[in-house]
Every structure is written in structure tokens, then in C-alpha cells.
Image: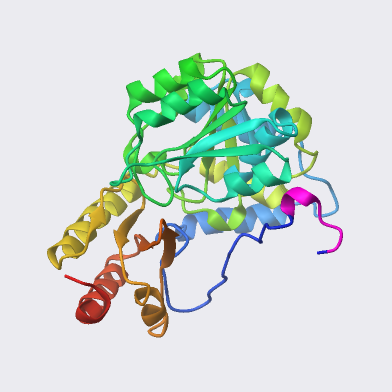
Amino acid sequence: MKYIKESLKDAKPYPTRYIKEGIILNANESPFDLNYNDKDRIRKFIESMNFNRYPDSSQNELILSYGKKHKLSKDEMIFSVGSDGIIEAVFKAVITKNDKVLTIRPTFTMYKEYAAIYEALFIEVDLDSNFNFTLELYDKIVEENPKLVIICSPNNPTGTTIDWVYLERIIKATKGIVLIDAAYAEFADINYNRLMKYDNVIIAKTASKAYGLASIRLGVGISNPANINMLKIVIPPFHINSLTLGIGLLFAQMDVLENVRKICLMRDRLSLALESVGIKVYPSKANFVFFEASSELVPLLEKRNIFLREIKYNGKTYVRMTIGKNHENDLVLRVIVSLNEKVYKI
């Protein structure tokens, strides 16, 4: 990479895999697709589209619809290409070279990539041995005075959440922006919008997880009008295509409580089943389970056309398994149990 800037010389592309067939439980997608009626609405919307025209850069219809559902004013939100688009917009608007960005470890790896892109000093605070948030996080914020603190809760890949009182303490101690990545908040029944009373909080949410709309790549940033205007400055015009804006109207009005309830029940059932065969499972409030594993497990599963996500952390191997449909979860569990003596030390 002859021309790449110094801060990116050791960076690697984010690892994504497009898998067409098999049991695909490696990307934290919803097991529930849209129903026929919703797809029929999309077909009719496509027929009404003017493909020769740019999309509505104001996002007005989507903003009004989402705001009505979630009790937000039109100046308190902005939509982007996935919640990643909101996260990067915060970096664009806030971070200059050598500014400090602080987060936990392990967590969503794109935070570190964005820090490298925008030449920030990236500070990580380890979770404890059970992947819970520690008091060291607060101490480090006070000590380092970062320009940006990022809290993913429930955290990806561990599924752990931060205590509400502790989170507010962190927000009050932070002189810069606190970005809350709430991609999985629905599974923990947490409404981070209540933190908008703090002027340094920005919340990033997504249509990809609980809402089952990963294919359209739509995210929303929620904050006070001043912060939203700041993000508007750095987000390019026409960045969300017309089809995504149209389908986004479904997202704005969807009630996902029943699907979330089903996923949480399957998650807890799977966790108990894995624990019953001696596997160390960490409590998760997201749409996945997180457990200790041998480095042999994921390759052996892939030979059986089963795809989970392997996580390497502090010299150990862990697996993040997205909650699929009941029959998928049961099949994967049976395969893991059959491999148990080979890949686990119990």
C-alpha cells in the first residue's frame, strides 16, 4: 500500500463474509425476515420511485415518522448508512489528529479503525474477567480527559451492559462527547434516549438487529439539536438512497417487541443448554451468546456448513453465536455437543 497514510499502515479491512448457504449465525442478524405484506408495500414503493432523481436529502418523511413513533423532534435525529455512518460522523465532526478516544476492550473493532483513520490516540480499558464494565473505566476517563468516549451497551461481542447509574457518572465526568452505541439495546430493554438530557451524549441506533433490516443499511443518530446539526455538517448530501429511505418508513413504525421477546427466550435457553454440557457462557443481553471455546471449534463447524464468529482475546478463544431460528439453534447445539469431547476441556 504505497500511498496509504502513516496511521493506516498496519490497518486491515474489516473482515466480512458473504455466505449464501448454510446456518449463518456469525453477523448478529435477525432470524426473522419481513412478512409478505411488508414486502408487498416495498414492491409498490419501488414501482412509484423515480430512479432518475436524487433521494430526499432532508430525510423529512422518515424523520417525521420516526420522531412521532419515538417522541423525538425533527431536530433531534439524523439518519445515515447504518449506525456505522453515525459513528464515523462523530469522528469526522469531533476528532482531530492526536485527540484521545477512549473505549473498552474487547468491543466493536471499527472504533479502533476510525481512530486510525482520523489519527486519534486510541485508549482501551479492559473489561473484567467476566467481561463486565470496571471502575477503571471512570478513573481512566478522569485521568486521560478524552475528546470522545464510546460505550457499546449491550457490548459487541460480549453482550454485557453497563450499569445505568455508572453510565450517568461517566457522562458527567466526561468533558467531551459520549457516544453510546445502542445497536443491541432493544434486547436489553434499555431506552438510552433518556440520556438526551446531557448535552454531550449522542446515541447511535440501527435497523439491522432487532428490526431485521440489515440489507438496507440504515442507522439513526439521536441527540440534542446542536449535536445533530454538527453531524449534518460532515454527512454528505444524498448519502441514503431512495429505496432505503422508503423501506426506512417500515423501520420507523415497526413494533418488534414480539420478535425481540422470542430472540431473548431462545438466547437464554441456548445459554443454559451450553452451560449444561460444561461450556463457560457469559451472560448476554444482546441477540447472541458468547462463550469460551477451543480454536478448533469454528473451523470444525464450518466443515458442516455452520458459521459462527470466532473472537481472539488475551490469548484465549471465544465464540459469538447469533441467535437463529429454533431449529438452527438446536442443530448447532447438537453438533457442538457431539464435538464436545474433542474441542473442550471439561
Quadrant showing the C terminus: bottom left
Q: Where in the figure is residue 122, as x and y percent of width and height?
A: 60, 39
Residue 218 appears anywhere in the view: no
Q: How many marks?
A: 0
**Residue nearest the observer in this picture, 163 or 83:** 163
Q: Residue furthest left?
A: 276
Q: Is residue 100 left or right of residue 168?
A: right
In the rendered view, tell whether residue 168 sits above or below residue 221. above
Q: Where in the figure is residue 63, as x and y percent of width and height?
A: 62, 31
Quadrant showing the N terminus: bottom right
Residue 251 appears anywhere in the view: yes
Q: Where in the figure is residue 18, as x and y percent of width and height?
A: 57, 71
Residue occupying image coordinates x 73% and y 40%: 118
Q: Is residue 329 left or right of residue 218?
A: left
Q: Where in the figure is residue 116, as x and y percent of width and height?
A: 68, 46
Give the residues in magenta.
2-8
In the rendered view, tell whether residue 26 sits above or below residue 132. below
**Residue nearest the observer in this picture, 266 or 283:** 283
In the rendered view, tell whether residue 298 sits above or below residue 204. below
Q: Is residue 142 left or right of residue 277?
A: right
Q: Is residue 3 magenta?
A: yes
Q: Is residue 243 magenta?
A: no
Dividing the picture into quarters, in which one does residue 111 lie?
top right
**Residue nearest the observer in this picture, 134 or 95:** 134
Residue occupying image coordinates x 74% and y 48%: 7
Dividing the picture into quarters, in which one does residue 189 lie?
top left
